[in-house]
Image (cartoon, coloured by chain):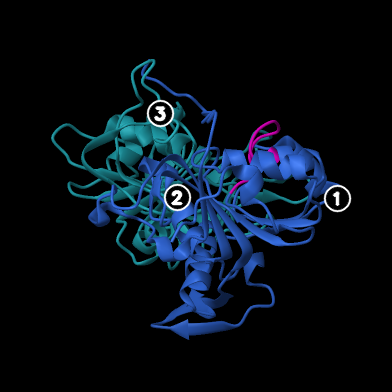
Chain colours: A blue, B cyan
Amino acid sequence: MNKVVKNAKEAIVGMENGQIFMLGGFGLSGIPENTINALVESGLTDLTCISNNAGVDDFGLGLLLKKHQIKKMISSYVGENKEFERQLLEGELEVDLIPQGTLAERIRAGGSGIPAFFVPAGYGTEVAEGKEVREFNGKMHLLEHGLTADFAIVKAWKGDTMGNLIYRHTANNFNQPMAMAGKITVAEVEELVPAGELDPAQIHTPGIFVQRIFQGVDYEKRIEFETTKQ
Amino acid sequence: MSLDKNGIAKRIAQELKDGYYVNLGIGIPTLVANFVPDGMEVILQSENGLLGIGPFPEKGKADADLINAGKQTVTTIPGSSFFDSSLSFAMIRGGHVDLTVLGAFEVTDKGDISSWKIPGKMVKGMGGAMDLVAAAKNIIVATTHTDRNGNPKLVKECKLPLTGVRCVTKIVSDLAVIEVTDQGFKLLERAPGVEVQEIIDKTGAPLIVEGEIPEMNL
């Protein structure tokens, strides 16, 4: 079994206009830089992107936004991207804002074969509009649905040729649940090793969830707010 | 005199208890970490996947893979752990976090909160705020008592889109500590030198004032 593809360009083969994508990362931490850049180059349009954030104006998903390749974003927080806010306020972009924990759980559920579940987040707010409400243990909950995607695109620290993945520190974030929720999951890693080299006890994402893997190049790993001791 | 941001954070730090797991929101709440009393162990949870946030890194030691929910570079403390976003919110939703501190645009005397959206003007998203307020047992709002134009932020009804309903337990502002009770806002403490009447005047809902109101002990 060999899931290795050469590079990002080969990893995006079969991706089409109008498809649904999940992209891992929190802010700019743990985003699949190589694959995003390949998507920008591909010129694919009308994409629906499920991602906690939307990058910044000149990095990450902001690059796809700038070229108007995204039709709809499903996110929890998009505050760091002015172009995003502009497109949203002017009606150029469809946006579904979802509470972060609900978003993470919808993705985890989607990848786990759980079609729907109840959570308290958003009850009594505009997030509840059109959703079934039910009381459990004296508390009101909303029915939320699992999410899947045509392609899930994740970034890991280390991976092996069988698709096993290990994330580093807080760069795990949405990558781990998203890896489970793609019909095809593409993983880009900083270090790709032969099967057998990673300690099975340390694997975050077992290889069964991953269909394509490659070692990325030229990681910028940009820091959004570098904060150090005064 | 009204408190500055650090004063508000310092007062909130008095709500901490040894062994608490705490989630601090962006802004004033983050400052609470600077005032954890000596000898008290408080573990800070960051919803992007870190339990045990440490201080900001030394210059030159910032790591792009190690950030807090405000996307600032941080460090870890001994005994910290990393996890994915769904597990992070399992901690929050499951009621394992003891205290949440967050900012707000408005809070009502029923404990409703608006904090995430100004229609037509600012649409940043709710991030984890809706999950936190819907699940945490103890939610303290850190805020100025009035907005930039002098309008009360403690009100009877939120004008802005809600983040959650009947969830805020306490408010620490630059003027006062106020508890949200079944009967409404109840004044517990006032900032040093601030008169009760000023707090009543700047609160946009009835305020229960019982007996002498002590000054905050900072």
- Residue at which label 3 appears: B63
Name which of mark 1 and mark 2 comes first in the sequence. Answer: 1
What chain letter is assigned to the residue under label 3? Answer: B
- Residue at which label 1 appears: A92
What chain letter is assigned to the residue under label 1? Answer: A
Q: Residue at x 50, y 70 (%)?
A: A111
**Foreground residue among B173 and B138:** B138
Q: Which mark is residue B48?
A: none
Name the image quarter holding residue A74.
Answer: bottom right
- Residue at which label 2 appears: A173
Name the image quarter holding residue B74.
Answer: top left
Residue A165 image point, x, y percent:
39, 52
Residue type, label 3: Asp
Q: Residue at x 65, y 33 (%)?
A: A59
Judged from the image, the secondary structure of the residue bearing numbered disc 2 is loop
Residue type, label 2: Asn
Q: Is residue A38 visible?
A: yes
Image: A204 above or below A7: below
Kindly indicate whether the residues beneath marks 1 and 2 are on one polypeptide chain. Answer: yes
**Foreground residue among B151 and A25:** A25
**Foreground residue among A79 and B139:** A79
Residue A114 image point, x, y percent:
49, 79
Q: Residue at x 58, y 63 (%)?
A: A184
Residue numbers of the magenta segment? A53-62
Question: Which quadrant of the figure contains the C terminus of chain B?
Answer: top left
